Image (spheres, rainbow, N blue to C red):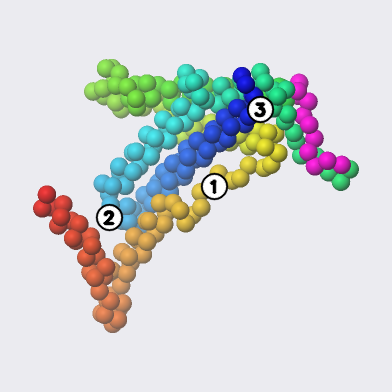
């Protein structure tokens, strides 16, 4: 490998960005689940077909992307990165923060044998999630990217035989995040920015605005006393509906 430090740091950065997208999908799914509560489900029902499609598409995409991320069958995956990092550990020049920075440098070099042990520990931690990884690969191979004849007529049986347990999924993602955060610190000499999704840029905002308008339409005092006409704000929707009905 020519210039392994450049190659592996770029590789790690791409993995970080891919994982951030996986986390983004997961967050949107969690928000949609919260809106299924009895006191909020009405909002989802306003666009029931759309939100069902969103839920199914996001879930499928998240599981497929996570499978690609951890499957050793893939050319690019986190196991591949860790194995290559172990082989070229000397070239990576890992450092850690100096707790006694007042006495000197803010970063200290991590010895090669110690860094290799850290990588081995990360590989072992990931391998402990082998059960959920096997099930993710099965979903990809049998219904996501290929149609296995055994499951074509009954795709639901895949979910029974290769169940995706939410707690196992969460644990796997926590391990991935821990490994990425630590490796980012060693190789980029800084803490990893949060994977949290800003509240103003997720599906929650769409549903919150929808719910607010539903409440406005039901506010008789606002409509009768103030003369507010919600229908004026729905003209575009009616025009779109008419256009589709005419097709």
The residue at the point 47 percent across, 31 percent down is 66
Query: Residue 209: x percent and y percent?
Result: 37, 61
Mark 1 vs 2, N-terminal side: 2
Mark 2 or 3, which is nearer the eye? 3
Relative to 96, does residue 39 appear above or below in the rendering? below
Mark 3 or 1, which is nearer the eye? 3
In the displayed orientation, state which residue is furthest to the right: 103
Is the residue marked by circle 3 packed among few (<14), some (14-19), or many (20+) residues within 10 Å?
some
The residue at the point 61 percent across, 34 percent down is 180
Relative to 9, does residue 226 appear above or below in the rendering? below
Q: Mark 2 falls on what kind of element?
A: loop
Magenta segment: 104-114
Mark 3 vs 1, N-terminal side: 3
- On-image quarter of the N terminus: top right
The residue at the point 23 percent across, 60 percent down is 237
In the displayed orientation, state which residue is furthest to the left: 246
Read off the residue under disc 3. 5
Query: Residue 23: x percent and y percent?
Result: 49, 40
Residue 113 located within the stretch drawn in magenta: yes
Query: Residue 194: x percent and y percent?
Result: 59, 46
Asked where in the image residue 143 lies, by quadrant, the reply is top left
Read off the residue under disc 1. 196
Read off the residue under disc 2. 46
């Amino acid at each position: 490998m020519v210039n392994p430090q450049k190659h592996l740091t770029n590789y790690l950065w791409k993995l970080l960005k891919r994982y951030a997208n996986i986390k983004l999908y997961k967050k949107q799914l969690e928000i949609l689940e919260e809106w299924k509560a009895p006191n909020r489900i009405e909002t989802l029902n306003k666009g029931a077909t759309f939100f069902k499609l969103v839920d199914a598409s996001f879930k499928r995409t998240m599981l497929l992307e996570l499978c690609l991320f951890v499957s050793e069958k893939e050319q690019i995956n986190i196991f591949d990165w860790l194995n290559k990092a172990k082989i070229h550990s000397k070239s990576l020049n890992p450092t850690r923060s100096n707790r006694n920075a007042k006495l000197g440098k803010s970063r200290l070099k991590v010895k090669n044998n110690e860094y290799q042990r850290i990588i081995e520990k990360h590989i072992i931690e990931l391998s402990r999630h082998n059960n959920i990884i096997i099930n993710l690969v099965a979903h990809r191979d049998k219904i996501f990217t290929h149609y296995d004849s055994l499951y074509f007529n009954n795709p639901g049986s895949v979910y029974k035989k290769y169940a995706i347990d939410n707690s196992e999924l969460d644990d796997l993602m926590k391990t991935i995040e821990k490994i990425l955060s630590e490796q980012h610190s060693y190789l980029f000499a800084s803490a990893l920015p949060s994977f949290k999704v800003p509240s103003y840029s997720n599906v929650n905002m769409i549903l919150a605005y929808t719910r607010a308008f539903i409440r406005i339409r039901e506010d008789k005092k606002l409509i009768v006393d103030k003369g507010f006409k919600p229908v004026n704000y729905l003209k575009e929707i009616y025009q779109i509906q008419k256009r589709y009905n005419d097709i």
